[in-house]
Image (cartoon, rainbow, N blue to C red):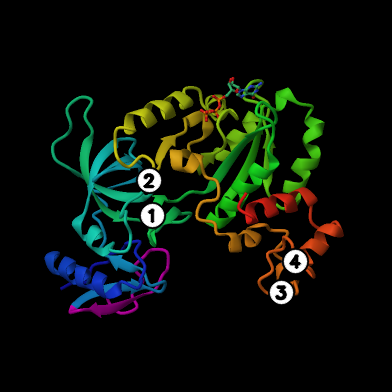
Amino acid sequence: MAKKRRNVRATFRKGHDTAKRERGLTRAFEQHGGEAEHERGERVSGKGHLTRKRTVAGAEVVEDSSGQIVLPDVDREVCVLGRVLRVQGLVSRVLGDDGRQYACATRQLLKQLATELRHVVAAGDRVWVRPEGPPPADGALQEGIIERVEPRHGVLSRSSRSRQHLIAANIDQILVVASAAAPRLKPNLVDRYLVTAEKTGLRPIVCINKIDLVEPVDLVPIIGVWSQLGYEVLPVSAETGFGVDRLRARLRAKQTAFTGQSGVGKSSLLNAIDPGLALRVQTVSSESDKGRHTTTTAELYPLGEHVGGGFLVDTPGIRSFELWDVIPEEVANYYRELRPYVSQCRFPDCTHTHEDFCAVKDAVADGWIDARRYESYVQIRSGE
Ligand SMILES: Nc1nc2c(ncn2[C@@H]2O[C@H](COP(=O)(O)OP(=O)(O)OP(=O)(O)O)[C@@H](O)[C@H]2O)c(=O)[nH]1
Ligand SMILES: [Zn+2]
């Protein structure tokens, strides 16, 4: 029998629960007639990953060099690649690259493989959908089955009861919105958001709105400190349109989660970026408030063509993004400028707040670390 080239890759890594998952795998492959037929070492992923054939409890599966299980390929003649806009209960809303939207269930095999993840599919995932059923009546969505989830990058997740809870996948960056005035700029609050962003490993962009209400030159010192640390800071005004083009350019073709305190002008900025966007965000959020998964999974909003594509990612959980899962002992690691000093303190468990012989405090006294940044560190470290 001819060996077929198949290159589906599920996104589930080997973990502690391997035995349990492998039992599920065996069942799954038995049910699907042992679809994993690969030669040892065959290149199957198209991206040049070598794979290896392995027998799991009697069933043959294929694993790539990173330990990901490779599933049989989807039929590309029939299936459509798309992006999950939101997951509500068992149904995922997918925007196909063909421009159509699909209401999708998830293939049983994927669920069986995903014993370690609460969500097999998350908002932002790139997925292959097999359209199912008759063409929909006017206004209804085409139904489909998610056959495969592409490997993820930039995952936004929180842990609850020792389980990793996936909120959104394939996030490229986090937009931290603050305002220059009304409410006044709170640099320490921005630092808190930066700490959380550092923890997630996603690139933050600081956007300071309402620049029309202050003398821009007054912001130069504070912007300078963040910029020197490598953070991008964009002064903007939703009111006058200042800086909005630059912001739009940063969002182009990216998946951006946005966050920031109430009243800083997030809705006004969304509208300045793409007219009507704030309304879409509000309408859908209030609609989905009736659902059960609003605070736990995110929602993607496609940006208009004039923005150049891209998606905004929103959920009340991301909006109030302050210090997600960050424990006090970790905080120093998320202050980029503290990192070079922390190993030089006298006491290995130094908190860098009150101890003598603290290299961090010395660096502040000598002017190597900005005093205000250090204060915000102490605030967060002390749980204030
Ligand atoms: N002067 C000035 N006012 C602005 C600007 N952007 C927003 N505002 C005003 O600030 C107020 C709050 O703006 P919103 O866009 O509702 O703020 P938000 O962050 O979406 O607030 P929440 O919905 O509570 O999270 C409104 O009165 C806006 O008109 C700006 O660039 N300059
Ligand atoms: Zn110290």
Q: Residues within 10 Å of mark 1 (few under 14, many from 20)?
A: some
Q: Residues within 10 Å of mark 3 (few under 14, many from 20)?
A: some
Query: Marks 3/2: CA distance?
Result: 40 Å
Q: Which residue is mark 4?
A: 355
Q: Nearer the viewer, mark 3 or mark 1?
A: 3
Which of pointers 2 and 4 lies earlier in the amino acid sequence?
2
Which of pointers 2 and 1 lies earlier in the amino acid sequence?
1
Query: Left or right of 56: which side holds 233?
Result: right
Q: Which residue is mark 3?
A: 347
* In the image, the residue with mark 2 has its CB under 8 Å from the nearest atom of ligand 1: no
- Which amino acid lies under the numbered mark 3 shown in the image of this protein? Phe
* In the image, the residue with mark 4 has its CB under 8 Å from the nearest atom of ligand 2: yes
- Which amino acid lies under the numbered mark 2 shown in the image of this protein? Thr
Q: Nearer the viewer, mark 4 or mark 1?
A: 4
- Choose top left, top right, bottom left or bottom right for residue 10: bottom left
Q: Check residue 126 in the rendering and tell me which mark sits there, or answer none.
A: none
